[in-house]
Amino acid sequence: MPRALYRKYRSQSLEEVIGQSHITRTLALALKSGKLSHAYLFTGPRGVGKTSVARILAHAINGLPYPPDKPHLDIIEIDAASNRRIDDVRDLREKVRIAPAKAKYKVYIIDEVHMLTNESFNALLKTLEEPPTHAVFILATTEAHKLPATILSRVQRFHFRLIAKTDLLAHLKAVAEKEKIRATEPALELIAGRSDGSARDALSLLDQLASLSGDSFDEAFVEDVLGLAPGSDVAGLLELFHQGDRQGLYRQLLDLEQRGVSPTVLSGQLAEALQPAAIQDPTLYDLIEQLIATPKALMPFLHLSAAMLKHAKAAPDQPTSGLKGEPKTVAAAAAIGGAELVADAHAPSGNQMERPTAASKTKKPAADGNRLQNNDWPKVLQAVKAINQPLYAILNQAEAEIDGGPLRLTFAYKLHQKKLDDQRYRKIIAATIKDLGFACPKIIGEWRTPKAARRGTAGSPVDSVIALMGGQEVTDA
């Protein structure tokens, strides 16, 4: 059975370790001078060479060849995740006193050492305080902050960095050439970029792509396998964003979602692509922060769309009010719990912000022509329907009375009237009315049998169930 590439190309010497020259150089000097410590701690992210260097060092200390034909009796590897109990560490303390069988030193490699219990750490501390002269400990962890300070003070600590993209790319090219994998350079660059500085992840991904493609692939194939938006589409989104073409931007975002691109993945791509421009335009960092928060959002696509459209600067020939698709975005921001996005979307920014004056405090209400009338209510319903189906189902069951005064919504069910008390729903209604160009009246919710219900013309049973449960009807295509 063929070995995985990350195992086949594991570093065999300190010289072969990539991206960690600050550590390998120091360890090589210590080996040459014979000035060795009784305990080392290797920290850093996964897949950057901690365990490989630990094994190489363990063999180098004893002058043994690496890799060995078989495990050596005096080099013991322990997985702390499965040997974390106090009894396991006590057993180690008893065995460490025994002299090595053949080698000069007995070396213990304890991986994921942060998984030990507090009692186990206390037991290990006794050994680290007074170690036998023939014992060397090499501890490795991805979470050094979980180790007690008493342990940290008794080890030589080496922090492994994320491997630079250029180093990963060179390594991938070398491995691809040896394995006769025909991959384009843009494809390898994409693999290196998506590996987050981990050599193991990069080789695992190269192995997977080679298996799926028959040892020949390009950048488009990598994007397809990883579920990424094509680079050309990301560039197109950014062009529309900088041009302030909100309609085109929203259509492109919607198209990518319908093509199966995850909004959480797309938000990461956009954040990475915007980072260089943010150096010249620091205001973009607000957008980048919101893009980074997309995976945690209740509705990731709406969060992504609201963030992009809110920060897109309107083009000179594009009106900022009454924009097609804008009501969806603003109300959607409120629907995902981003009430502050709604406020920010209608507020002046930067130097345009002014202190309230006496004139503004006594501002008169909108003219009658901008007041919401009964015949305007269907427009509001349709706009809400495009944004929030459950809210639309509830409002569609209500009897609306306006005629230039308060918006009075009468419900046949007490549950529906209570839902209108939710400030989130009220903000959606208010934002939608304002985006349609009307002054938002006071919203009053009442509970009594409306006229339509008394006339026997209420909605269908399906509509009632949808409104009651706060959902929407789903039919098979």
Image (cartoon, grey):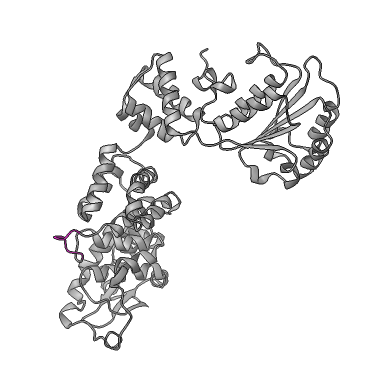
Write down the quadrant of residue 385 in the picture.
bottom left
Where 344 sits versus 444, above or below?
A: above
Residue 37 visible in the current orientation: yes
Q: Residue furthest left?
A: 317
The stretch of residues the image draws in magenta is: 315-320
Where 231 sits versus 452, above or below?
A: above
Q: Residue 316 in magenta?
A: yes
Write down the quadrant of residue 193 in the picture.
top left
**Which residue is at 79% across, 34% downward?**
89
Residue 461 visible in the current orientation: no
Where 220 sits versus 376, above or below?
A: above
Image coords of residue 83 (percent x, y): 73, 33
Image coords of residue 291 (percent x, y): 38, 51
Image coords of residue 407 (percent x, y): 28, 78
Is 198 left or right of 239, judged from the image as shown? right
Front residue of this view, candidates 281 and 441: 281
Image coords of residue 18 (percent x, y): 51, 27
Front residue of this view, candidates 395 and 8: 8
Write down the quadrant of residue 129 in the picture.
top right
**Which residue is at 40% across, 16% downward?**
177
Where 264 sits versus 290, above or below?
A: above
Front residue of this view, candidates 263 and 270: 270
**Which residue is at 47% across, 25% downward?**
203
The chief SS type of the magenta part is: loop
Q: Residue 214 in magenta?
A: no
